[in-house]
Image (cartoon, rainbow, N blue to C red):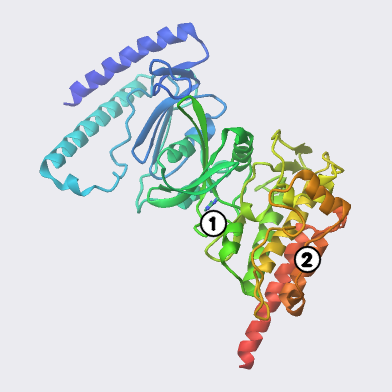
Amino acid sequence: MERSSLLTVVLVWAFLWISAIHADSKDDEKLLCTCENGKGTCMNGTCKGHICFYSWVHGHEERGCFSEVIYKEQCYSKFERLFMHCCRENLCNAFTTPPSNIKPTPTPPELNRPELWITLSLLLLITTASMCGLVLFLRFRRAHGRNDVHGDHDVTILKVPDGDDPTYGDIFDEFCTSGSGTGLPYLVQRTMARQISLVQCVGKGRYGEVWRGTWMGESVAVKIFSSRDEQSWFRETEIYNTVQLRHDNILGFIASDMTSKNSSTQLWLVTHFHELGSLYDFLQYSSLEPESCLRMCLSVACGLVHLHTEIVSSQEKPAIAHRDLKSRNILVKRNGQCCIADLGLAVIHSQSHDYLDVGNNPRVGTKRYMAPEVLDETIRMDVFESYKQTDIWALGLVFWEISRRTIVNGIVEEYCPPFFDMVPLDPSFEEMKKVVCVDQQKPSLHNRLHSHPILSAIAKIMKECWYQSPPARLTALRVRKTLSKLDHDSDFSIEKLKRDI
Ligand code: ADE
């Protein structure tokens, strides 16, 4: 048995060896690898690259080529239930299979039938026999001192799973505590994205559509970008994949994927799903107590501080300005906190690395939320601080939307967008400019707000976000500090009240 499988393997390798020599004579640099037709540069079942790979993620197999540039991140990933094999010989990924000690996916009830068990056992036997053959062959090769011409060893990283199916949070934790820490390798992102079933469309707009999907039984949000907004997909994908952005108040990224469907390109961004939807949707049907209003405002400020702050330690992160902050781009979480979404227009700045990257997205922010210096076009586009200051203007407007829906003395206002009483629906640039720059109008604040310690403090913050002069506005950090203090003080007075009773 062992001898025959050894013979088979030797014959296969002899064939590969001849093919390898043949391919090398055509191209010194690159290897010939097995791949799936229709994917990337795959032609006639082969592609050319510096490394061949075989991947197995939850039963989904893929073979192909990696370039020298990306193979480290892809091949050296460590993840339960992902089997990754990278090798540096022609067609070396042709016959790779996942080892049998990978936990099979839960057995569906029909598999209890005896004939299926027999088939399964036979399959297992054949796989084990081939593996033994392969191991013997590799030992044989090593014993006979064949040198690896490229110097690198084949890379096979496998962690045998020991628990239940992982959540995408588990998968992220696996990757984020090792490697580059910015998220999942592209191949895993793509594999995950292609295992998602779209369930229900939860939003539609000029940007495209947002769907609730499921991945391994868990809900995920899938934003499908309209083709005219592809630059936003590129920008958001770039930022999430290069910047360490894991934060409670920033929408959690899972994967990005680009596919070709009927000769058009489909662009997906997969993120955490929040069933309460956007802050805009939430405020339509919910009113808040002052403490919940404070919690929401504080969480948005925390998210914005994280974006705006450059971190220079080992967990380094450039500063990011959002440029399209609004209630539709904020999601409400079950714990009453919010998280900021849509980084498609963001600008990136690093003082330590001395760069300002404004991207090349033709999109502009939402007119209703534009700061006076954007509307009158006096904004200093070469200065990063300017973009942060426009975010603060919009932050004040978001606080205003939340505060209108907050009950004080039994009074609450209906939901209205900022400047609802001064401009029409879908206002033009000129209409906004007249109200915000020429007339210098600010949204009005209801009197009830001044009679509550939390709401009066939030009203004061709003006013300080709306100075015509951008540098006079509060910073996100100052807003967060003031709100945090308010939060501690209100906790303290609630505790004191409880003690007094
Ligand atoms: N709408 C837009 N993004 C969403 C998300 N991540 N979860 C739920 N609803 C959304």
| Residue 207 horizontal/vertical position (percent) | 59, 41
Image quadrant containing the C terminus: bottom right
Q: Are marks 2 and 1 in contact (CB under 8 Å)?
A: no
Instruction: Give the residue type at disc 2.
Output: Ser
Q: In the rendered view, would you say 294 is above or below 48?
A: below
1 or 168, nearer to the observer: 168
- What element does badge 2 sit on? loop
Q: Residue at x 71, y 44 (%)?
A: 365
Mark 1: give few (<14), some (14-19) or many (20+) Cα within 10 Å. some
Which residue matches tag 2?
444
Which residue matches tag 1?
277
Residue 193 vs residue 245: left or right?
A: left
| Mark 1 CB lies closer than 8 A to ligand 1 | yes
| Residue 484 horizontal/vertical position (percent) | 70, 69
408 or 499, nearer to the observer: 408
Give the quadrant of residue 7.
top left
Q: Residue at x 11, y 43 (%)?
A: 114
Q: Residue at x 30, y 45 (%)?
A: 105
256 or 364, nearer to the observer: 364
Q: Is residue 248 visible?
A: no
Q: Is residue 278 visible?
A: yes
Instruction: Give the residue type at disc 1.
Output: Gly
Q: Which residue, as the protein is rendered here, is positioned at the far bottom? A: 501
- What element does badge 1 sit on? loop
Residue 445 vs residue 501: left or right?
A: right
Disc 2 and disc 1: Cα gap in Å? 27 Å
Which callout, 2 or 1, points at the residue further toward the start of the chain? 1
Q: In the rendered view, would you say 320 is above or below 148?
A: below
Image quadrant containing the N terminus: top left
